[in-house]
Image (cartoon, rainbow, N blue to C red):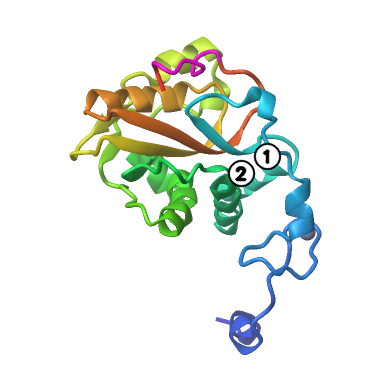
Amino acid sequence: MTLLKKIHEMIPYLHPLPNCCVLCRCECTHAYALCIACENQLNQVPSSTIIAGITAGLSYQNEVIQFVHQLKFNDKLEYALILANNLLKSINRQTLPHAIIPVPLHRQRMRQRGFNQAVEIAKPIAKQLAIPLFKQHCIRTINTQPQAELTAKQRANNIKKAFRVIKPIPDHIAIVDDVLTTGHTVTAFADCLRQAGAKKIDIWVAARTPLKFKQVNNEKRI
Ligand SMILES: [Zn+2]
């Protein structure tokens, strides 16, 4: 290790830097790296498009797309905290679930990425709400192709039967995922949990595309 690299690595320990907003770079008073002014400008999900059973922190557009990409593809885990805190603001605390289950990644994808973004978003939420986080209760048995590369019909077929519950689960569960696009992934996962005995399933997503979701806009399924 060069001396320069060594010094660089020591800097944060010598002079802890204040949080810096990821958008405007101002000094940040939040415990996470997004200032209040920037947070207030993020797109919330319009109330006219709220779907029963689905709680979304933010609308998946503009800066929010960057947040998710930074988390998933650049390993910037601090964005999970930003997304989690925005999702927390939307969660109805009157009827909280008995457990939070993040949408699992296939073990091969997990190995490639090194973490599951849904788990990273779910962790601070579970901690804040004091609800158990079940990371080992469900697995993804099929390594589905990245959903973005497929047509809507291909996605639906691709994701069916991709999940399995391997440990007992409680009656009321909240599924956590990063982004809801077509809704096929959470619908398939919810079906799997329901077959394993779950009676009530809430869907908590950090961000949702501003489109309508016919596939999940059905209380019987979600
Ligand atoms: Zn800012």
The residue singled out by tag 1 in the image is 65
Q: Magenta stretch: give its range.
A: 214-220
Residue 189 image point, x, y percent = 36, 28
The residue singled out by tag 2 in the image is 68
Ligand 1 located in image quadrant: bottom right
The answer to whether marks 1 and 2 mark residues whose Cβ atoms lie closer than 8 Å is yes
Question: Which residue appears at 39% of the width and 38% of the height?
Answer: 174
Residue 3 visible in image: yes
Question: Which residue appears at 64% of the width and 82% of the height?
Answer: 16
The three-letter amino acid code for the residue at tag 1 is Ile
Identify whether 15 is placed above or below 206: below
Label 1: state its secondary structure: helix
Badge 1: residue crowd in 10 Å (few <14, some 14–19, many ≥20): some
Which of the pair 40/6 is nearer the observer?
A: 40
Which of the pair 171/27 is nearer the observer?
A: 171
The three-letter amino acid code for the residue at tag 2 is Val
Q: Is residue 52 left or right of residue 34?
A: left
The quadrant of the image that shows the C terminus is top left
Q: Is residue 189 magenta?
A: no
Residue 210 visible in image: no
The quadrant of the image that shows the N terminus is bottom right
